[in-house]
């Protein structure tokens, strides 16, 4: 899935620093986490990919922002049909994943679980080690999964896709 058109739409209105705690490198790590988890969970890859770049796209600050998930869900609804297409079922999953990621602990759908785990596995970027009791899927709860994701988040890894596929140079933070 080519996420560049979605990223362009997101970055047109993004108000936080691209290199911030909830910015582009975080989205890319969430994407990589989600794709890795989906190999075992069977989650919908398109929903997981869109969640990665949309879930924090409407944050207005780097600290407490409890309404950013619902705002991201509404933003996804605005982009649907213009920038990306999902069928009704897939879109409901994306909407719920974005909307609920800020306050819900679990959900019965494996795609939503995978989305939330992919984000929670990146908590090391703000000094919080992910705890298995806060994760949904068995694969995310594994110590080796937590360690892999936490090491990347804690050291601020910027996945190669940021520059290579998305064309975003976080060193210069270009205007979109």
Image (tube, rainbow, N blue to C red):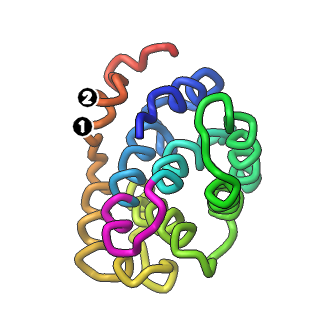
Q: Is residue 22 left or right of residue 158?
A: right
Q: To which residue does mark 2 refer?
A: 164
Q: Nearer the viewer, residue 13 or 131?
A: 13
Q: To which residue does mark 1 refer?
A: 160
Q: Nearer the viewer, residue 100 or 92?
A: 92
Which residue does the image show at 59% across and 75% down from the upper left? 109
Q: Is residue 74 left or right of residue 109?
A: right
Residue 85, position as x, y percentages in the image: 61, 40
Residue 171, position as x, y percentages in the image: 32, 22
Q: Is residue 77 above or below residue 101?
A: above
Q: Is residue 155 above or below residue 146?
A: above
Residue 132 seen in render? yes
Residue 22, position as x, y percentages in the image: 51, 44
Q: Are marks 2 and 1 in contact (CB under 8 Å)?
A: yes
Quick check: is 36 in the magenta stretch?
yes
Which residue does the image show at 67% across and 72% down from the upper left? 104
Disc 2, SS: helix
Task: Quadrant for the N terminus, please.
Answer: top left
Q: Nearer the viewer, residue 63 or 52?
A: 52
The residue at the far front in this view is: 87
Q: How many marks?
A: 2
> Main SS of the magenta segment?
helix
C-alpha distance separating marks 2 and 1: 6 Å
Q: Is residue 51 above or below residue 116?
A: above
Residue 159, position as x, y percentages in the image: 27, 42
Q: Which residues are magenta?
A: 35-45
Residue 62 seen in render? no
Which residue does the image show at 37% across and 24% down from the upper left? 168
Disc 1, SS: loop
């Amino acid at each position: 899935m080519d996420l560049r058109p979605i990223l362009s739409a997101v970055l047109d209105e993004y108000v936080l620093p691209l290199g911030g705690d909830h910015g582009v490198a975080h989205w890319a790590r969430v994407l990589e986490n989600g794709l890795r988890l989906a190999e075992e969970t069977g989650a919908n890859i398109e929903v997981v990919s869109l969640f990665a770049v949309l879930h924090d796209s409407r944050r207005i600050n780097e600290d407490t922002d409890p309404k950013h998930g619902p705002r991201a869900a509404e933003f996804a609804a605005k982009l649907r049909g213009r920038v990306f297409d999902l069928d009704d079922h897939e879109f409901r999953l994306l909407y719920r994943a974005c909307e609920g990621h800020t306050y819900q602990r679990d959900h019965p759908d494996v795609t939503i679980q995978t989305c939330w785990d992919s984000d929670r596995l990146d908590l090391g970027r703000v000094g919080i080690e992910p705890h298995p009791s806060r994760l949904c899927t068995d694969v995310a709860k594994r110590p080796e999964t937590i360690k892999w994701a936490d090491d990347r988040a804690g050291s601020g890894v910027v996945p190669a896709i940021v520059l290579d596929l998305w064309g975003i140079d976080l060193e210069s933070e270009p205007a979109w």
